[in-house]
Image (tube, rainbow, N blue to C red):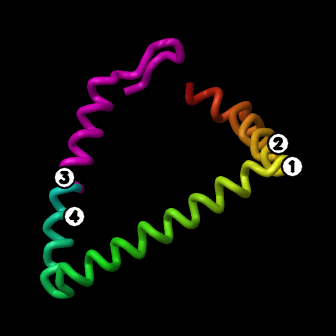
C-alpha cells in the first residue's frame, strides 16, 4: 500500500473502512446500551442524558467565553497556526 507522495490516497477504501467502522460500532453500542438501560431503567438513562447535555452546554459556553477574550484569543490563534505549520502536518497533506 505504498504510494508516491504526489498520488492521492484511495478515497473509496477510506470511505468503505469508515462506514464499516461506524456501522459495526453503532450496532454493538445499541446492544450493549440496551442491556444497561434494561437494568437501570429509561427514566434514569434520560436523567443522566439531560445532566450530561446540560454540563456540556455549560462547559462549551464557558470555553467559548474564555477563548474569545482578547488576550487568549490571539494566543489560541497563534498556537493553531504553529500546529498547522508543524512539519508532520505538512507531510500528512
**Image depth: mark 4 or mark 2 in front:** 2
Give the CA distance from mark 3 to mark 4.
Answer: 9 Å
Q: Main secondary structure of the magenta part?
A: helix
**Image depth: mark 2 or mark 3 in front:** 2
Give the CA distance from mark 3 to mark 1.
Answer: 44 Å
The residue under the point 34% across, 78% down is 48
x, y percent for residue 81? 75, 34
Give the CA distance from mark 4 to mark 2.
Answer: 40 Å
x, y percent for residue 66? 73, 57
Q: Secondary structure at mark 3?
A: helix
Write the start and end of the magenta stretch as one range.
Answer: 1-25
Q: Neighbour class for label 3 at 10 Å: few (<14), some, many (≥20)?
A: few
Residue identifier under label 2: 74
Residue identifier under label 4: 29
Looking at the image, residue 27 sits to the left or right of residue 62; the answer is left
Q: Identify the residue at the far right of this view.
A: 71
Mark positioned earlier in the residue sequence (1 or 4): 4
Looking at the image, residue 61 sits to the left or right of residue 71; the answer is left
Give the CA distance from mark 1 to mark 2.
Answer: 6 Å
Mark positioned earlier in the residue sequence (4 or 2): 4
Taking depth in this image into account, of 52 and 83 the one nearest to the observer is: 52
**Image depth: mark 1 or mark 4 in front:** 1
Mark sitting on residue 24: 3
Give the CA distance from mark 1 to mark 4.
Answer: 42 Å
Mark sitting on residue 71: 1
x, y percent for residue 13? 28, 28
Amino acid at each position: 500500500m505504498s504510494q508516491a507522495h504526489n498520488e492521492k490516497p484511495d478515497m473509496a477504501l477510506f470511505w468503505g473502512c469508515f462506514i464499516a467502522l461506524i456501522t459495526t460500532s453503532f450496532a454493538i453500542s445499541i446492544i450493549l446500551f440496551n442491556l444497561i438501560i434494561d437494568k437501570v431503567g429509561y427514566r434514569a438513562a434520560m436523567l443522566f442524558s439531560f445532566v450530561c447535555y446540560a454540563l456540556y452546554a455549560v462547559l462549551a459556553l464557558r470555553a467559548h467565553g474564555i477563548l474569545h477574550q482578547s488576550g487568549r484569543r490571539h494566543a489560541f490563534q497563534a498556537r493553531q497556526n504553529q500546529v498547522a505549520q508543524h512539519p508532520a502536518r505538512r507531510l500528512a497533506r
